[in-house]
Amino acid sequence: MAGNSERRGAKRSPGSKKGQTVGSGAQRRKQLKGKGPTPKATDRPAHPAHRKARAAAKRAATPGRRSPGGSRSPGASRARDTGTGPEWVAGRNPVVEALRAAVPATALYVAERIDSDDRVRESMKLAGKLGVPLMEASRTELDRIAGSNHQGLALQVPPYDYAHPDDLLVRAQEADEAPLLVALDGVTDPRNLGAVLRSAAAFGAQGVVVPSRRAAGVTATAWKVSAGAAARVPVARATNLTRTLQAYRDAGLYVVGLDGEAKIELGDVELATDPVVLVVGSEGKGLSRLVRENCDVVAAIPIGSAAESLNAAVAAGIALYEFSRRRRS
């Protein structure tokens, strides 16, 4: 009979006997320990929320990185607005032209496995002569820092170190000849600023003043157009151009503005040999109202009827030549 202990050869495995068994009851309750409250999703390393929070913190700690929405971090925006961030010259022609003009640069970035041509080879050769470090970067990295039209070359240009308007006044007063400064009112094209710097260096001006807002700054383009004059003629940024001109007047300089509709011609201005601040307005709007009101004299450059006005840089060059000619004579 199955299960009969008296049957020959029959064996019962231990613990298979049916019936009541002793339960654990409260015997092991003291050994159970709670794990505490469930941690937040951002505190769990395996949770997607934790990975997203870690990536966001990494983006915030990296200056200049764009957020997922496309906007820059607050620190990067401030750096760009104040002109403290580096500038990028991208593209093979712009890069080689900037290096030919000896634009100050901190690094030349070259794409990996770039298709080399004459411009690439010349750029690398000029960078070596100028002591500009060569950096190899992926095209993805170049797209991020210099835009998509870099053609495998990007030149990093440091921000320009602007002078204070008072520094220009001291420099002008310490010159061997009568002070001559140039102020630009509303000139937004950096090529015009570069051309004005070149004329200022050629005709003995001690410095150029530009407004800090809504005006051209000393970019790589201005450096290139100035043909090196940006390294010799200091540029100052004025928070308020009107107050800066008033301070120059209080220091003994005469303010001469250029306006195509003025009744006095430039050749008739008697102040050309005195300490002068020459103010040039934009080609479209000319001098602003407040700047015009703070001018001691407003003069015009006579031109033919075929032309409506002169380019700001051309007008500044003509006026500086006229002042320089009369001072020499």
Image (tube, rainbow, N blue to C red):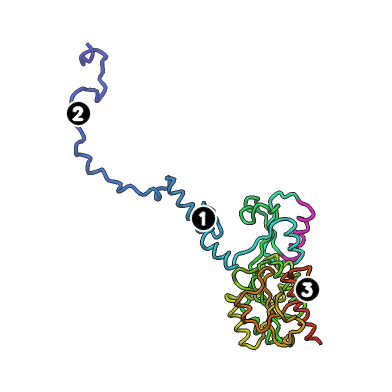
Q: Which mark is residue 303?
A: 3
Q: Amino acid at mark 2?
A: Thr
By secondary structure, the bulk of the magenta-drawn segment is best described as helix
The reply to whether the magenta stretch includes residue 284 is no
Q: How many marks?
A: 3
Compute the Cα span from label 1 to label 3. 57 Å
Asked which quadrant contains residue 7, the reply is top left
Residue 126 position, x and y percent, is 76, 62
Q: Quadrant of residue 237?
A: bottom right
Give the secondary structure at mark 1.
helix
* Label 3 secondary element: loop
Q: Gap between marks 2 and 3, in whole Å?
A: 118 Å
What residue did someone put label 2 on? 21
Whole-Å distance between the Cαs marked 2 and 1? 62 Å
Q: Residue 118 occupies which quadrant of the picture?
A: bottom right
Q: Residue at x 71, y 71 (%)?
A: 312
Is there a contact, CB below 8 Å, between mark 2 and mark 3? Answer: no
Measuring 52% from the left and 63% from the top, which residue is drawn there?
A: 75
- The region drawn magenta spans 116-131
Q: 213 or 176, which is in the foreground?
A: 213
Identify residue type, mark 3. Ile
For residue 24, side relative to residue 178 (left or right): left
Give the percent coordinates (x, y) of residue 200. 73, 77
Give the labeled residue for mark 1.
Answer: 59
Query: Which one is earlier in the sequence, the residue at label 2 or at label 1?
Result: 2
* Disc 2 versus disc 3: nearer the observer: 3
Instruction: Give 23 or 173, whichever is nearer the viewer.
Output: 173
- Foreground pick, 312 / 123: 312
Looking at the rendered structure, the secondary structure element under dot 2 is loop
Q: Residue at x 24, y 12 (%)?
A: 8
